[in-house]
Image: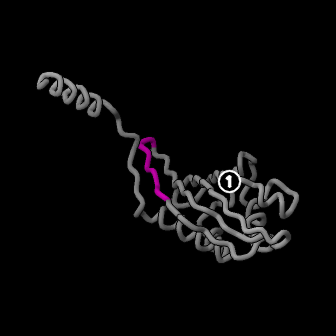
Amino acid sequence: MKKILLLIFLSSSTVMLSQKSAGLMSQEDDLSKNIGKMHDAYESANFDFWDQMISPEAVVYLNNTKMDYKTMRPLFVSHHTIFNNIKIEDRYQHTNYFKNGDTWTNSWFTWVGTGNKTGIRYSNVAHLDWKWEKGKIVQMQFYYDPTGFYLETGNLIN
């Protein structure tokens, strides 16, 4: 039995040592904190901080629909005319510093808002990825269920 346990220990140690690290991850770094501030800014319909953080040339994917930041920004601003009492709840974000030099912040949260047209209170889990270069966001990938937007507007892009 001791030989089996020793063999398992040595095998698992060898596997752990042979795996290569992809990079570092942090929840307490400035980039992760800035994404938290961006969530606050969205919630309060103040997009000035977004304009500071996001490159004007940023590429944006909303559920795989590709657009630029100039096109995406008014869509997100319009959320506050389509819905009321918008909240970003159960937030979590961390930043990945990859060995190849890429830096991405990932965030997850529950978006909550009440439709002005239907009066329905929506709760929508979302996942966002933000790619950083030289202190600016250059790519965003937003994944969420657009059903509430469709019911309120008849448009799937929002």
Quadrant (top left, top right, bottom left, bottom right) of the C terminus: bottom right
Q: Is residue 78 left or right of residue 2?
A: right
Image point 22% across, 26% down: which residue?
Answer: 8
Q: Is residue 99 magenta?
A: yes
Rendered location of residue 122, percent (x, y): 71, 64
Rendered location of residue 38, percent (x, y): 58, 68
In front of the other: 125 or 75: 125
- Mark 1, residue position: 144
Q: Is residue 16 above or below residue 104?
A: above
Tag 1: amino acid? Tyr
Magenta range is 93-100
Q: Is residue 7 left or right of residue 32?
A: left
Image point 86% across, 62% down: which residue?
Answer: 153
- In this view, which residue lies farthest toward the right? 154
- Label 1 neighbourhood size at 10 Å, few (<14), some (14-19), many (20+)? some
Q: Quadrant of residue 72?
A: bottom right
- In this view, which residue lies farthest toward the front? 1
- In this view, which residue lies farthest toward the left? 2
Image point 14% across, 24% down: which residue?
Answer: 1
Image point 73% across, 68% down: which residue?
Answer: 121
Q: Is residue 116 above or below residue 149?
A: below
Q: Is residue 51 magenta?
A: no
